[in-house]
Amino acid sequence: MEVLALSGLDYVILDAEHAPFGKRELDQCIATCRLAGLPCIVRIPNADASTILSVLDSGATGIQVPHIKTAEQARELVKLSRYGDGGRGFAGSTRPALFGNSTISKHLEQNKEPLIIAQIEDIDGVENIDEIAQVEGITALFIGRVDLTVAYGETDPNAEPVMSACLKICESAKVHNKPVGTFLANTDQLKWWQETGTSLFAISSEHAMIINGFKQVAEKVHSF
C-alpha cells in the first residue's frame, strides 16, 4: 500500500472477495492507506452485517458489494452500512473515531454516508437495475463484466449480450444520476467506456502489473 500510494493512483480496491485476506492483513492495509492519504475501497465477499461492520470500523473509505440483484438487497446493504435504526453498531474506540478521541456527534456526522458501491454481475441485477439505481444511499454502481459474461453463457466479455447488459447499466446510472464503474485489464478501451458515462475504473491488478513488468524485462534481456 505504501508503494501504491506513491504512484499517483486515485484510489485502490482491496479484493477481499477472491483474494485470501485475513482480518488482520486487511486492517493493516486499510490503516496504511489512511496514513498515506490513499482512498481505499474494500470489495467484501458478501453483505453480511459483521463483515460490513468490521471493514468500515477499520476505516475503509467504502465497500464494494458483489452480486446485488434486487432493490431490497440494496436497501438492506445501505441499512447495515449506516449507524442506527437496527443497522451498523456504533463504537467510539475505532480508527474512524480516532480511537476514542472524537465525539459521538462529530463521528456520526463524518461517517453518516459511507461510500457504498453495488456490483451488478447477474442477469437478475441487470433486469432490476432501474430499481437498484434508485435506492438512496447507494453511491455508485459497478459492472462485473466477467461474471456477466459467464451468466449469459458466453466466454468473451465483448459478446453482444454482455455488452448490451453493460450499456443498460450505464444508461440506468445516467438516468438516476449514479456514477458507474467497471474493471479493465488495461487502458485500451478506456475512452470507449468513458463515452458511455463510466467514470470509476479499476484497471489491472498489482499481480498483472508485476508479471507484465518482469516479462518485458525478461524478454528484452533474452533477446540479446
Image (cartoon, rainbow, N blue to C red):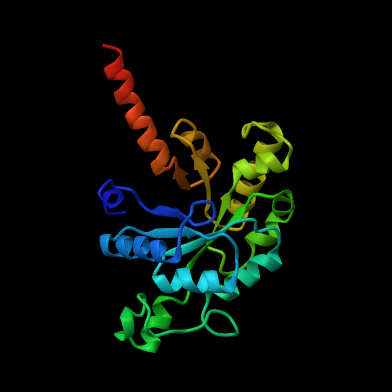
Q: Residue visible at 58% across and 71% down?
A: 78
Q: Foreground residue, 192 or 187?
A: 187
Residue 185, image x and y in percent?
A: 48, 36
Q: Quadrant of residue 50?
A: bottom right
Q: Quadrant of residue 152?
A: top right
Compared across the picture, whether 109 is left or right of 36 comes to right
**In this view, 129 is above or below 59:** above
Q: Foreground residue, 176 or 138?
A: 138
Compared across the picture, whether 207 is left or right of 121 comes to left
Count of numbered marks: 0
Q: Residue visible at 68% across and 55% down?
A: 129
Q: Foreground residue, 162 or 221?
A: 221
Quarter in which the C terminus is drawn: top left
Compared across the picture, whether 199 is left or right of 144 comes to left
Q: Residue visible at 27% across and 64% down?
A: 35
Residue 51, image x and y in percent?
A: 53, 69
Residue 90, image x and y in percent?
A: 47, 84
**In this view, 72 is above or below 180:** below
**In this view, 176 is above or below 212:** below
Q: Which residue sits furthest top?
A: 224
Quarter in which the N terminus is drawn: bottom left
Q: Quadrant of residue 165?
A: top right
Residue 29, image x and y in percent?
A: 36, 60
